[in-house]
Image (cartoon, helix red, strand yellow):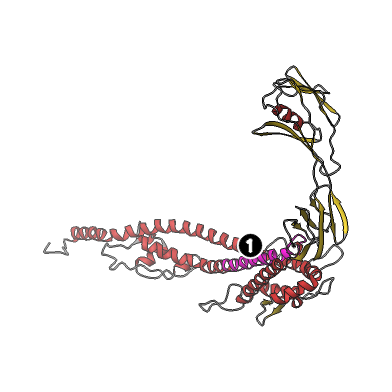
Amino acid sequence: MRGDEWPRSCIWQAWGHALPESDDNSIMGNVGISFGSPTSGQGFDVSTTVSAIVANLQAVETPWKNQLTTLQSEDTALTSIGTDLSSLSTALTSLNDFEGVFAGKEGSSSDTSVVALTNATSAAVAGSHTVEVGQLAQTYSYATGDLGATDTLSGSLTINNQKITISDGTATDSSGNKILANNTLATLESYINNGDYGVQANVVTDSSGSRLSLLSDTSGGAGAVTIDASSFTDSTTGKTISIPQAQLGQDAQFSVDGTSMTSSTNTVTTAIPGVTMQLLDVGGDTPIQVEITNNNSNVESAMTTFVNAYNTVVKDLSTQEGNTSSGTAEPLYGNSSIAMLQEQLQQAMTSTQSSGAITSLSQLGVTTNKDGTLTLSTSTLDSVLNSNYQDAMNFFQADSSSTSFGVNLTKVLSNVGNSGPGGVIYLALQQDSSQETDLNKNITNENTAISTQQTQLTTELNEANYTLQMIPEQLQSVNELYSAITGYNENPGG
């Protein structure tokens, strides 16, 4: 390749000049090649030169990358705020959920050996009740005498007018259904329990022998069972098997606040609304006192969690209004989403929507500090819960015909959080994501173009470098030709 055929960029760089600026190579204007004397044959470092040119080409991506870094910092801050808003929403749910902390009740008995409280639902009303137990409920039961566990049974047995016929090593009922072969007490027990005879069969074994016990499926006085065992025989001993009554069934008898009541079981669920009592023994001369109280401690704990979660969000937002520790602005400084979040939360927190006497957080012991955070006085809240529990609950909850502070705040949190399609955080993240996609696309396209130019430059500069390295040899050839023609020797001592 002749010198006048070198690529334009290579010619200029080969002689130690910067590339002249033009539409297609202005980005290389600050890159030059120093190779010493052009006749030394030394050439230049192609790899280093190409790297320098590529670095200049990549400079166009710097604003895009800086903007991408800024957007990613915004995403981190927005995501963190969204997470804390979600925590606030969760904390609020325990207060405005009909099955949440306000639904819980606590109960106690003055003598748990006589009356024990096993459950108190939201339907229970705080108050004191007097309970007297005169008689416990019992279930009818029947049992055979002692038998051999492996004795073979025969004959027939009628339970609640359903006949079981036992003969020839198998047992059948009136419909012809068979038990199993080898009719012992165990096979009869299994057969009865797999049927619908109104009793639960059990084989009881001790040192005296084995017995078949039948316990009525219906507890209390209404659970009597009719049993005809006149034809029921132990084939092994030849004796008739009788099944007499072992325990009389009866209803529990008790009173609540002077009103006499009965129950077929010792588990009583209707005497005090929302309260489940277990009758365990007949009381003495001293009536049992049952206390139903609201679960203040759980409500106070939930309120503390709510206040802390709200304070975290407030601090998140106020942090974005200042500078980082290094003195630079926070990622969301001046972002309109922050102002929108602050405004909507403030409006929701000062809402007075309620159907009861409690219309503000301040009445529940919540005060607002100068920095916008909240402080909870649990002693004030405890006093309000003791005096006006229902209205405190109504402040957070609402039925289909009314609204409340809790319901309104729930809607606001849904509108500002990171849930689609309309949450403030969600929309801000979506907008950033769209810009990031465009920036990444620009960077990818630019890198592709630079990669193509890098390949082309490497080829051209390698050719130029080869030509430079060949100059001494070409000059030597010219000298030799000149000497041959003229007889002149440039190196007479050589």
Residue 164 in picture, x, y percent from top left = 80, 25
Name which residue lies at 78% across and 74% down.
351
Q: Quadrant of residue 102?
A: bottom right
Decide whether residue 92 is among the magenta residues. Answer: yes
Q: How many marks?
A: 1
Residue furthest out toward the right: 259
- For image coordinates 67% across by 27% down, the residue present is 149
**Residue closest to the eye, 377 or 224:** 224
Camera-nearest residue between 485 and 464? 464
The residue depicted at 53 percent of the width and 66 percent of the height is 65
Q: Position of residue 321 (x, y in %)?
A: 62, 78
Query: Residue 130 at what x, y percent from top left?
Result: 82, 62
Q: Determine which residue is flagged by label 1.
A: 434
Residue 240 visible in the snapshot: yes
Q: Amino acid at mark 1?
A: Ser
Q: Residue furthest top?
A: 168
Q: Is residue 125 visible in this depiction of the protein? A: no
The quarter of the image holding the N terminus is bottom left
Magenta stretch, residue numbers: 72-101
Q: Is residue 178 magenta?
A: no
For residue 282, above or below residue 489? above
